[in-house]
Image (cartoon, rainbow, N blue to C red):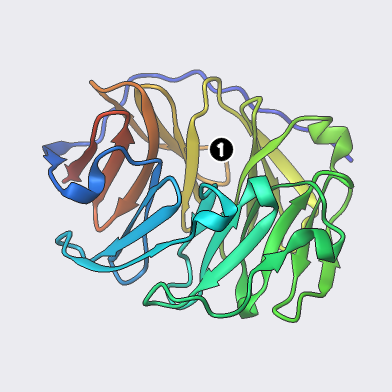
Amino acid sequence: MKKIFYIFTLVIFCENIYSQEIIKSNYTKGLNAFEIDKLNNFYFVKDNQVVKTDFEFNKLYDYSDKTFGNITFIDVSNPFRILIFYKDFNIIVFLDNKLAPLRSPIYLDDLNYFSVDALCSSSFESFLIFDSQNTSVNTISKELQTTQKGTNLYAVVSDQKARKIKETNNYIFISFENGYIHVLDKYANYIDSFFYEGLIDFDCVNDDLYLLGHNELVAFNIKKERIFYYNFDYDANKGFKIKNNTLYLLNEKSLISFKFL
């Protein structure tokens, strides 16, 4: 397996920003994370609770379950089948568009996956997991069967812990705590690697990769050509989303929107 690593030297290049605004809402205070679905609904995660609002931040539904501790990750790529992951208990819950459980919780230990660091939703109501014991990305069907096992990635990732998986139309991206993001094909075979020092979060718009640092956001297409760079006046950043020509940035104090030309 050939390993190709890219370390990027960033040159200042800014997209045109014509406005920025601190979003003032009761639901944006003290957040752990947030998401935006295809229907422009927001999901605000704080400890063990999810609040769903419309695009104008009017509350629609909420969900909370103290049984499994705090929520580790939420995936809203399918707004009618929302994935909630509780890493401390190695449990997944699927919710409908009103944040009601679709089925009983999925105990990954019962599927013989005892050490799952990252996962995400996939097509046909399946989901992807990074199996750290076998260092591979596997597909689990809605019937809870392992339908595909990716190649062993140990030569690439070693003992690093996975932080996040994201599936696009053509690729699987998986980030690790050392700042590497590895690109896999749809069968979870290794293709390539990015490196970004100080990586906080990443997201994908189509097959383009957006990388968040402490006070900057940079993006590359799959050919490693830089397509976006913006430097923030804000630090202590925690996460971001891009929707409708707007960048939403979450830091320790607030949620901020940046409008692009």
State the image coordinates of residue 181 (x, y, percent, origin top left).
Answer: 63, 37
Res 29 → quadrant: top left
Name above or below for residue 97 compared with residue 251: below
State the image coordinates of residue 110 (x, y, percent, origin top left).
Answer: 83, 65
Residue linked to disc 1: 224
Q: Is residue 193 left or right of residue 190?
A: left
Q: Is residue 207 left or right of residue 136?
A: left
Q: Residue furthest front?
A: 67
State the image coordinates of residue 143 (x, y, percent, origin top left).
Answer: 75, 81
Query: As shown in the figure, which amino acid type bears the numbered disc 1?
Result: Lys
User: Dot 1: what SS?
Assistant: loop
State the image coordinates of residue 126 (x, y, percent, origin top left).
Answer: 67, 73
Residue at 26% x, 23% y is 234
Residue at 63% x, 76% y is 104
Quadrant assignment for the N terminus:
top right
Viewer-proximal residue, 21 or 87? 87
- Mark 1 Cα within 10 Å, few/some/many (few <14, many 20+)? few
Res 213 → quadrant: top left
Q: Is residue 96 left or right of residue 247?
A: right
Viewer-proximal residue, 180 or 4? 180
